[in-house]
Amino acid sequence: MIVESLLPLGKLDPGLREPDTPLDIRDFAELAATAESVGLGAVLVEETKDDPFQLLALGATGTSTIQLGTSVAMAFPRSPTATALSAWSLSKLSNGRFILGLGTQVRAHIERRFGIPWHAPAPWIRDYVGAMRAVWDCWQNGTKLDYQSEHYKLNLMVPLFNPGPIDHPNIPVHVAAIGPNMCAVAGEVADGIRLHPVCTPKFIDEQVLPNLALGAARTKRNLDDIEVCMKPLIGTAPDEEALERVIRTVRARVGFYLSTPSYRRTFELHGWGDIAVQASSLARNNQWDDLPGMVSDEMLHTVATIATYDNIAAAINDRYSGRVDRIEFSIPVQTPDDADRFRGILEQID
C-alpha cells in the first residue's frame, strides 16, 4: 500500500484531526517537506477552512518527490473548466505529482452553503469528470472543445484562456464514494475511489468492490487500474495508557458516524441499524455527549483500527492489505526520534 498523510504532522491525534483544528497555511510547505522526509508516498489536503489548491501549490514548491493531492475538493461549486485549470497548474508546478480527489458534498451544503441547484450526484459527477477531461484534451492535443452532456455543454476555448500542453497531462482523478451509485460511477470514469473512514473491511468486500466492478464493466475498464484509497479511522499511541485516552476520542467519532444517516448503510450491514436510528435521534436532540455510550466495544473495534505503535502496522495490514491500494495514516512527528519511529512503522505496512 502507498501510505498517504492528511497534514499536519505533529499537530493531531493520529488520524483524528478535529474540524476546529485546521491546518495553518503558513506551515504547510514545511509540513509537506516533513512528510516527504519520513518516507510517505503522498500528502493530501481536504477542503474545509483553506483553499486546497493554494495549499498544494505551497507544498509543491517545498518538495521534490512526494505526491500531492486533494483528498476531497468540492467539485460542483466549481465549473469543470475552473477545476481543470487548477489541476493543470498544479501538475505543471509539481512535475506530475498532483492527484485530483473530488467530492460531491451533500444536498444541504450544495443548496444552502454554495447556493447552487441540486442534482443527483452520481450522473452529475460522471458528466463533471468527462467535461474536465475534454478540456484537458483540448489543451494538450488541440482537440476542438465540444463536450455535450446533461449537466455541461462546453464548446468555447480561445487562445487567451488555453494554457497549452504540459509534460504530465494525465492527471489522476479520484472520486469520493460510499453509496452503490457513486461507487459504480467511480468504476466507470475515475482513476481511484476514495472511501470514507466508516467503510469496514466487510463493507468494502460486499458493497464497494462489487459496485466498483459493476461500473468498470460498463466502460470495459480493468478493475486493477482503479486505485482503492482509504482514510481509515485509526487510533494509535506509544503505549497502552496513552492509547486508552485515544480510544475515548475514537469512540466519540464512531458515535458521530453512527448518528449520521449518510453512513447508516455500513452499520446496517453489521446488524446495527436500530442502534444507528437511536443515535440519530440523540443527535437531533443535541444529546452529543450520549453518543459514545451507544458504541459497544465490538462496534468500536469493527469500525476503527486500534493498536499501539508496536502493533499498528500489523493491524492495518490485517484489515486492508489486498483491499486498499492507498491508505491515509500518520503519527505525530515532532522530533528526530518520532521521525525514525514513523519510518519504522511505514516500512512494515504492506
Image (cartoon, rainbow, N blue to C red):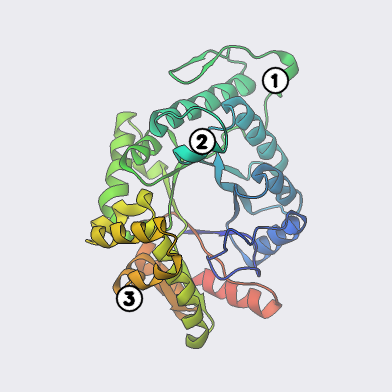
Foreground label between 2 and 1:
2
Residue 317: give x, y in percent of width and height: 40, 67
**Secondary element type, mark 2:** helix
What amino acid is at disc 1?
Asn
The image quadrant that residue 319 belongs to is bottom left
Residue 67 appears left or right of 193? right
**Secondary element type, mark 3:** helix
What amino acid is at disc 2?
Ile
Number of residues whose C-alpha sits closer than 10 Å to that of mark 1, classed few (under 14), some (14–19) or many (20 or more): some
Residue 330: give x, y in percent of width and height: 56, 67
Along the line of sight, the residue nearer the viewer: 60 or 256? 256
Q: Which residue is rendered at x = 29% and y = 73% of the image?
A: 298
In the image, is residue 37 above or below residue 123? below
Residue 19 appears left or right of 120? right
Q: Which residue is mark 3?
A: 297
Along the line of sight, the residue nearer the viewer: 175 or 347? 175
Q: Which residue is mark 1?
A: 162
Residue 52: give x, y in percent of width and height: 65, 45
Foreground label between 3 and 2:
2
The answer, for residue 104, to whether it is visible in the render is no
